[in-house]
Image (cartoon, rainbow, N blue to C red):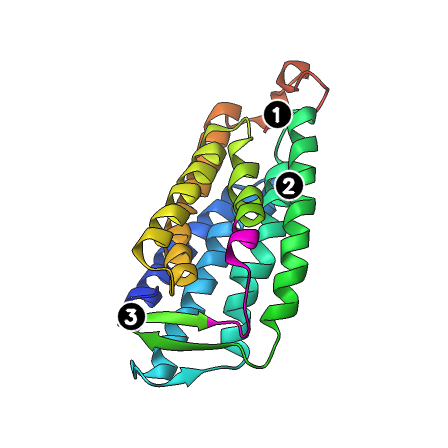
Amino acid sequence: MCFSAEASFIGAAVVGTAGVGALVLADEPRQVPFAALPLLFGIHQALEGWTWVSLDDRSRASLSGFGVHTWVLFAWAFLPVYVPWAVRLIEPIRTRRRWMSWLAVVGAGVSAYMFSRSIRPEVTVSVVQGQLDYHLGGDVPSVALAVPYVAATCLAPILSTHRWVRAFGAANAVALAVAALMAIKDFSSIWCTFAAFLSLLVVAHQLDRRQREGPDRSTLGPAHTAADGSPVS
C-alpha cells in the first residue's frame, strides 16, 4: 500500500490468498485471466512493500530499478489491456463482447504509450508526506490518459452481464475518483491500493458462478447457453 511497508505486506497476503482461492474456483481456462487479478494485485502490493523497505521511509530519498519499473508497468501498461481482455473472455453476449473488444483496443493504445514511458531510466519513486509518489519523467498528459484508461479498466467490466464483474468495474471507477480527490501526486499508488482490495469481488464472482452452475457441471445441457450459442459462465 501507499501508506507503509507493513500495510503493503498485509494487503499482499490477504489479497494474494484470496487470489489463490479464485484460481482454484476457476475450473475453465477462460475464467483464469479474470480470476488471476487478485493474485496479480497481491504481487503488486508486495512489490510496493519492498519499495517501502528499500526507501526506509526517508522523505528525501528516491528509488529506481527493477521493482519500481515493474510496479509502474503493471499499474499503467498492463491493466488497461488485460482487464477488458479478461472480462471479454467470460462474457456470454456477443454484442457486449464486441464493445469490450473495442475497449481492449483503446486499452492497448494506453498500454503502448505507458510502456514506452515506464521503461525509461528516469522512472523513480520517493516518499512525499508519508506516501509513495511515482515519477515517470517528463510531462504525462493526465487528462488525455485518464479517459481511455478508465474506459478500459472500468467501463469494460461495467458492461458485463455478470453482477460481480459489474460491481468490480463500478467500484474501481469510484476508487479512481476517490484516489484523485485524496491526492493527485500519489494518485496511482492510492488507487492501486483500493483496486487490490476491490479485486476481492473477483472471488465473489467465482463463488456466485459455481453456486449457479451447481456441483455437477457435466449435467448442463443446451439450456445453459446464451442466445448466440455461447456458454454461460
- Height in image: 8 above or below 57? above
Front in this rendered view, residue 216 or 145: 145
* Quarter occupied by residue 7: bottom left
Front in this rendered view, residue 61 or 48: 61
- Height in image: 169 above or below 186? above
- Say which residue label 2 marks: 103
Earlier along the polypeptide chain: callout 1 or callout 3? 3
Picture quarter with the N terminus: bottom left
Spatial CA distance of label 2 from label 1 is 22 Å
- Say which residue label 1 marks: 232
Spatial CA distance of label 1 from label 3 is 42 Å
Spatial CA distance of label 2 from label 3 is 34 Å
Q: Nearer the viewer, mark 2 or mark 1?
A: 2
* Kind of element beneath mark 1: loop
Q: Badge 1 local density, few (<14 within 10 Å), some, or many (20+)? A: some
Earlier along the polypeptide chain: callout 2 or callout 1? 2
